[in-house]
């Protein structure tokens, strides 16, 4: 890290120097107990969407250090008040172990931020932290959307889950199997959150819950597949909507040219190269570049209102006379 960014502590009060030392020991070498010297037992740390106690903070520091063993943290500027302190800092590291569902990609992040602390005596009781979260995650390969809808917890909770559920039930979709080959094993799940993104370049997206057992294989993969199920493949949809092991033993399938497993007899089979991922709280949006497509005349399986329908039996809508 740039030497000029290191703060000159000679003009600072002992209280501020103690805080800087404790932060650098905790974040820089993992000595989280150094925080006990400067944080009150009732300490609370507030982020844009988080609230942490002292113990929460200690475990997230250790989590970060496990995932980013070369993590460096430097305080670059301090502004002191009577019972307040603003610290400006930079932090960087290389992702060597799994972190928030990300595989150890060896990617680096470097981020700047500021921490605003309020003291009671010589101990910090409250801290507010801001940093370039989007910059950090995009350098790790997880670009966040602006105003990430999943983060607006208050706004979200204003709309009840029942309303959201009935809204989703009105939607009509196809049903796909999103699949990947991982360590020689085919893995996949049923997904109806599929959409076209663009024709040029040929991009599609699927949205997958992080709790899915397929998720960690998918996020680590270079190629994956999307099979759009045919109307006579309700049994396949049901197999892939479960969490059982070895789902592919129960269906006919083959390897695509890029190695990902494809369901035999699907209405459409797509082979994709993972182009981008977008974190959205409990889910991740996977954007794939279409590398190969096979389409058939088979009608699609249709899903709406919690039930499956035969896509060959759809009746064309007519304009109302009113
Ligand atoms: C019709 C249908 C659509 C589904 N769509 C999605 C989806 O878009 N994203 C998702 O993550 N899960 C979706 N699921 C749920 C998963 O298929 C289900 O949780 C599955 O058990 C996950 O398997 P896994 O944990 O083995 O990966 C859907 C299920 C059904 C029946």
Image (cartoon, helix red, strand yellow):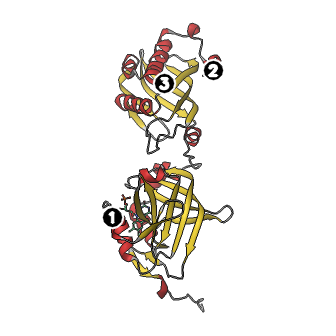
The residue beneath circle 3 is: 117
Residue 199: image location, x then y, percent: 66, 66
Ligand 1 is within 8 Å of the C-beta of the residue at disc 2 = no
Please tell me which residue lies in front, 31 or 127.
Answer: 31
SS at mark 1?
loop
SS at mark 2?
loop
Ligand 1 is within 8 Å of the C-beta of the residue at disc 1 = yes
For the point 46% across and 13% down, the residue is 18
Residue at the outermost bottom position = 321
For the point 47% across and 15% down, the residue is 21
In the depicted structure, whether residue 247 falls above or below residue 51: below
Q: Can residue 236 be seen in this view?
A: yes
Residue at the outermost top position = 10
Q: Is residue 209 visible?
A: no
Please tell me which residue lies in front, 201 or 33.
Answer: 201
The residue beneath circle 2 is: 2
Label 3 or label 1, whichever comes before in sequence order? 3
Is 132 on the left or on the right of 171, as rendered? right
Label 1, residues with CA under 10 Å away: few <14, some 14-19, many ≥20? few
Label 2 or label 1, whichever comes before in sequence order? 2
Label 3, residues with CA under 10 Å away: few <14, some 14-19, many ≥20? many
Give the alpha-carbon distance from disc 3 to disc 2, as whole Å. 25 Å
SS at mark 3?
strand
In the depicted structure, whether residue 124 falls above or below residue 250: above
Residue 44: image location, x then y, percent: 40, 30
Please tell me which residue lies in front, 295 or 159.
Answer: 295
Residue 235: image location, x then y, percent: 35, 75
The residue beneath circle 1 is: 242
Q: Contact (CB < 8 A) between labels 2 and 1?
A: no
For the point 58% across and 32% down, the residue is 110
Ligand 1 position by quadrant: bottom left
């Amino acid at each position: 890290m740039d030497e000029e960014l290191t703060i000159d502590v000679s003009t600072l009060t002992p209280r501020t120097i103690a805080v800087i030392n404790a932060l650098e020991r905790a974040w820089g070498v993992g000595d989280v107990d150094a925080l006990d010297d400067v944080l009150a037992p009732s300490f609370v740390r507030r982020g844009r969407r988080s609230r942490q106690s002292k113990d929460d903070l200690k475990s997230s520091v250790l989590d970060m250090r496990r995932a980013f063993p070369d993590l460096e943290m430097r305080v670059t500027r301090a502004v002191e008040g009577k019972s307040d302190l603003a610290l400006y800092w930079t932090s960087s590291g290389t992702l060597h172990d799994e972190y928030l569902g990300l595989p150890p990609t060896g990617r680096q992040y470097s981020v700047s931020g500021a921490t605003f602390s309020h003291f009671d005596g010589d101990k910090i009781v409250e801290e507010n932290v801001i940093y370039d979260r989007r910059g950090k995650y995009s350098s790790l390969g997880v670009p966040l959307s602006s105003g990430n809808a999943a983060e607006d917890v208050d706004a979200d909770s204003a709309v009840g889950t029942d309303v959201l559920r009935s809204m989703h039930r009105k939607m009509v979709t196809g049903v796909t199997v999103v699949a990947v080959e991982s360590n020689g094993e085919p893995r996949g799940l049923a997904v109806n959150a599929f959409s076209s993104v663009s024709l040029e370049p040929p991009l599609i997206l699927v949205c997958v819950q992080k709790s899915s057992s397929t998720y960690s294989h998918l996020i680590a993969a270079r190629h994956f597949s999307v099979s759009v199920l045919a109307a006579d493949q309700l049994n396949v949809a049901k197999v892939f909507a479960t969490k059982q092991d070895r789902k592919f033993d129960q269906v006919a399938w083959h390897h695509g040219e890029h190695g990902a497993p494809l369901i035999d007899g699907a209405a459409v089979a797509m082979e994709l190269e993972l182009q981008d991922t977008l974190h959205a709280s409990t889910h991740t949006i996977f954007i794939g570049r279409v590398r190969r497509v096979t389409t058939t005349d088979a009608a699609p399986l249709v899903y709406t209102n919690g039930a499956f329908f035969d896509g060959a039996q759809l009746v064309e809508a007519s304009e109302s006379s009113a």
